[in-house]
Image (cartoon, grey):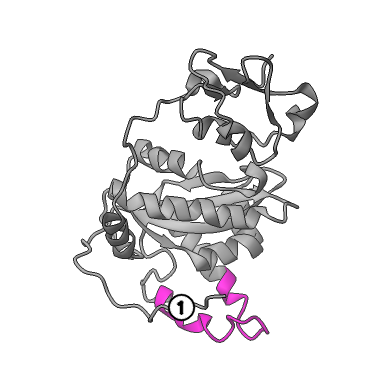
């Protein structure tokens, strides 16, 4: 079975696929100069799809679920630099949410975008745990507070910081999950040294895409730390064997609308 499927009527033999292949395994062979991957090189393929994505005549398809290929309409995804700048500068960490849940279908739409995040050697190690039930999110916040209580009077860097958080929680203020209705966890294989970075990249994709769907997000650092070290929380969330948490994010429908862009520190760049 061919590793790449080539429409010989559309292929021009331009060689772009050969040049962009990160593994350098595509050859232009034969009189028709059609691209091919020799059998002995197939195992070196990253399945990244560069050959397919950069083919100017759309003549090539990576033989990986080819029936699922979606055409890229002309001009799709084109964003002006000005619009991109405003979109990203408007992004805020949302800590106030409405009581209305985000439909599961919409969450899946955003996660489908995050599925295309870059990962080392295109390993795609990130999987997702979505806590959709607000009551369970509340329980996660409580377990995080329990973990914080275990840090008091220890050498942990957060030891002196957690009493104020615990006090606020005991007064009925959710300083952990901010009463968010939903929580998203990225989890990765144990023993994969580059997967933690892949998870942050994927979560960033979710974070950036979410506002386009009307969803507000906030990185959940306290919960992320507890999920990595506190066994009762790990048991509550119940990851499959061989997986571990990478980071967490709270999300929901934002209560307030962003109406301006605040200042940031001046840009500092060193050129070499």
Residue at position x 75%, y 52% from top? 191
The quadrant holding residue 226 is bottom right
Which quadrant holds the C terminus? bottom right
Percent of width and height locating residue 29: 69, 21
Specify whether residue 157 is painted magenta. yes
Q: Residues within 10 Å of mark 1 (few under 14, many from 20)?
A: some
Which residue is under mark 1? 165
As displayed, is residue 218 above or below residue 238? below
Left or right? Give the position of 10 relative to 39: left
As displayed, is residue 269 above or below residue 32? below
Residue at position x 47%, y 63% from top? 220
Percent of width and height locating residue 142: 49, 64
Specify whether residue 62 is painted magenta. no
Percent of width and height locating residue 17: 58, 32
Is residue 96 something that shows in the picture?
Answer: no
Element at label 1: helix
Percent of width and height locating residue 118: 55, 48
As displayed, is residue 266 above or below residue 253? below
Counting every numbered tag in the picture gives 1
Decide which of 103, 90 is in the foreground and name it. Answer: 90
Residue at position x 35%, y 39% from top? 106
Q: Which residue is outermost to the front?
A: 31
As displayed, is residue 196 above or below residue 22? below
Q: Which residues are magenta?
A: 147-169
Left or right? Give the position of 57 relative to 194: left
Is residue 107 something that shows in the picture?
Answer: yes
Residue at position x 65%, y 49% from top? 120
Left or right? Give the position of 180 relative to 241: left
Which quadrant holds the N terminus? top right
């Amino acid at each position: 079975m061919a590793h790449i499927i080539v429409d010989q009527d559309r292929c021009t033999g331009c060689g772009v696929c050969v040049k962009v292949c990160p593994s350098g395994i595509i050859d232009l062979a034969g009189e028709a100069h059609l691209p091919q991957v020799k059998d002995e090189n197939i195992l070196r393929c990253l399945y990244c799809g560069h050959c397919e994505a950069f083919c100017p005549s759309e003549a090539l398809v990576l033989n990986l679920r080819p029936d699922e290929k979606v055409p890229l309409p002309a001009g799709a995804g084109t964003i002006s630099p000005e619009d991109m700048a405003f979109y990203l500068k408007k992004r805020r960490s949302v800590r106030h949410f409405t009581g209305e849940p985000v439909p599961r279908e919409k969450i899946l739409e955003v996660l489908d975008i995050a599925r295309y995040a870059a990962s080392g050697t295109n390993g795609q190690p990130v999987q997702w745990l979505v806590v959709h039930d607000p009551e369970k999110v509340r329980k996660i916040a409580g377990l995080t507070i329990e973990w914080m209580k275990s840090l008091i009077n220890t050498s942990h860097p957060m030891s002196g910081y957690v009493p104020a958080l615990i006090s606020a929680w005991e007064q009925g203020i959710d300083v952990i999950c901010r009463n968010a209705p939903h929580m998203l966890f990225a989890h990765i294989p144990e023993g994969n040294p580059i997967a933690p970075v892949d998870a942050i990249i994927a979560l960033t994709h979710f974070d950036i895409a979410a506002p386009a769907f009307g969803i507000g997000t906030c990185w959940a650092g306290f919960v992320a730390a507890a999920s990595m070290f506190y066994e009762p929380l790990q048991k509550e969330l119940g990851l499959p064997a061989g997986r571990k948490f990478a980071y967490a994010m709270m999300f929901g429908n934002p209560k307030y609308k962003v109406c301006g862009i605040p200042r940031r520190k001046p840009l500092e760049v060193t050129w070499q």
